Amino acid sequence: PAAMHAFVCSAIAFAGRARLLHEPALRVAPVVLSALAPAAPQDRSYAPQVNNEAEVWDSFPRTWVPLASVFELDPERPTPVTFLGRKYVLWQDQDGLWRAFVDACPHRLAPLSEGRIDRKANRLECAYHGWAFDSDGTCTRIPQIDSVALGTALGSPRSCVASLPVAVHKRLLFAWPWGGLPALGEGPGTPEHLLAGVRENVSTYTRDLPYGWDTLVENLIDPAHIPWAHHGLQGKREDAVPITMSIPRDAAASQTGFSFDFGDRTMGLRRAGTGEFRAPYVVDYNAEFQVPAGATPRQPFRLTVVCIPTRAGWSRAIIYGFSQAELPPRRVPPLPPLPKAPAVALKHKKSMVSRIFGLMPVWLVHTLSSRFLDSDLAFLHNQEKELARRAPHSAAQAYFMPAPADQPIIALRRWLAAHAPVLGPLPPPITDRATLLDRWTQHSAHCYHCTTAAGRLPVWRKRAAGTLALSLLFGMRAWPARLVAAGCVGLLWALGWAEQALRFQDYKHYENH
C-alpha cells in the first residue's frame, strides 16, 4: 500500500522535483506533444461567451498557462490564482522552488491559500484543521488521527492534493494544468515562444481586471484608442491620426495567433512597427519612432502584456516594465541553488524612461501603472456587457468597424471563433466606482511591494505626526523647527496620497482636458 500510495501521489504531482525549471531560461529536452491543440477539436459557431465551463476547458488551446509574476509574489505566503474558473495556490518551498497546487484541501475543501508555509517542515499547511502537504502534494500530517490509523489515511491517494508541473521563465510562473506530459522546448505555446524578446530580470505589474480576456486582448491590439483613452498619460488627443494598418487576410487561420504592421503618432512623434498576438496569452509590440533629421534618436518602443482568462467577465494583465529590479526577499533563506551554467549578460542601453522608473520605488511605479489602466477600465467593463446584450452570438453584428485600424479586432474575433471559446455568462455590471476601480483588490493585495508599502505607511504617519507635535510644542519660534513642521505637514499629505493611491482613485475623463 505504501508503494502504491507513493506512486499515485507522484503521478498526481508529476515528478515533483524534476519538473520545476528556473530563470533565466528553460533548459530541458523537448517532448513530443502538440501545443495549442485543444483536447477535442470541434466545430463551434461564433459566440462571445460559452456558458459551460467544462466546454471551455475541453476546447481551450493546450499551452503552458501563465499564472503570476514571481517579481510580485510574496515568497512567505500562499497566493491564490484563478484560470478559466479553476482555483490554484502558488507557494515557494524551502528549496526556493515555486509550486502550484489545486486550491482545495482534500479534507473538507478549504482553500489552502488561506493557510501558511511551515518553513521548518518545508510544507504547506491548511489553516482549517492543520493538514500539511509536502512540495509534491503528498499529505504528511493529519493531526486528528492517532498513530494506528494515520498510516492508512496517509496511504490513501485521496489524501494528496493535485500538484501541477511548473516552470519559471523571465519571472513569469507558468503551470501545465491539462494533465499528461507538458509541451517543452521552444515551439508554440511554450514559455520561450510566448516571451520571446522579453528582457531578463525586469519588473512587472499585475492587475486583475473586471472585464474578460477577449476584451483585454481586443483593447491591447487597438493602438487607435491610445491618444483618447490615455490622454495626458501616453500622448495627447492631438496625436490622433488615421492609422495605417496591414494584416494578412488569413490571420485568424493559425492557432499560434497573428501579427500586424501599423503606423501611428504618439507623444508628438510618428511611430511604425509591428504588433503581435502570440496566442492565446501574449500581446507584443515592437516599433520605432521617426524623429526629425538631426534630432536625438529615441529608444524603440517595446511593450509586452500577458493576458490571462481568470473567470467569466474577469482577466489578469501582467505588464513587463522598463527597468530591472530585484526579486522579493525571503525571511527564511532558501537552500543554496544547484550550480548552473553562467548566463551571457546582454548589455542594453537604458532609455531615459527606464532610468527614471529605475530610481522610483516599485510601489510608486505600480500606482502610476494603475492610473494608466484606470483610464479605460470603465469603457471596457461596460462595453462587453453591452456587446453581450445586443448581439450575444455575433460581435460582427454589434460592432461597426470601417477603419483600417479595426482590422486586428476583426482578426481577433475570427480567431476566437475558430480556436478558443470565451467563458461566460458575464456577471452583472459593477455600478459603484470604488468597487469598479478597486486597486487594492485588483492589484495591491497580491503584490509584495505594495502590501509592504501599505504596512509601512502607518508607521511613517505616526513618526511624522509625533515630530510635528514636538516641533509645534517646543520650537515654533526658531526657523529650523518651522522647516521641520512644514516638512512634516508635507510628508503627512504625501502619506495620505500614497495610502489612497494604493486603494482607489477615480478617473474622470470630463475633467481631463
Image (cartoon, helix red, strand yellow):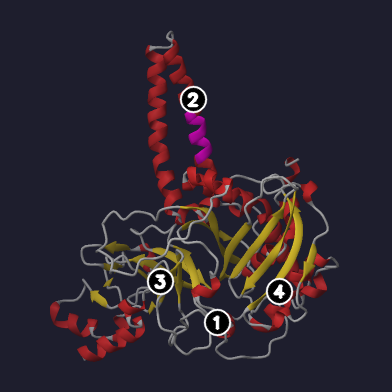
Mark 4 or 2, closer to the camera: 4
Residue drawn at (33%, 63%), measured in percent from left and top? 115
* Relative horizontal placement of residue 368, taking residue 489 as reference (left or right): right
Position in image of residue 105 (x %, y %): 35, 73
Kind of residue at disc 4: Leu
Residue on which the image places disc 1: 57
Q: Disc number at residue 360?
A: none
Residue 324 % position (x, y): 47, 53
Number of callouts in the render?
Answer: 4
Q: Which mark is residue 489?
A: 2
Magenta region, main secondary structure: helix
Residue shown at 27% from the left, 68% from the top: 123
In this rendered view, identify the residue nearer to me: 99 or 85.
99
Mark before the other along the chain sequence, 2 or 1: 1
Distance in Å between CA atoms under marks 1 and 4:
20 Å
Q: Which mark is residue 103?
A: 3
Disc 4 to disc 2, how far (Cα)?
A: 52 Å
As helix, strand or loop, the secondary structure at mark 1 comes to helix
Residue 48 makes an appearance in the image: yes
Query: Which quadrant, please, contains the C terminus?
Result: top right
Q: Is residue 181 above or below residue 79?
A: below
Indicate the amino acid at tag 3: Asp
Report the residue at 39% width, 41% height from top: 456
> What residue does disc 4 label?
412
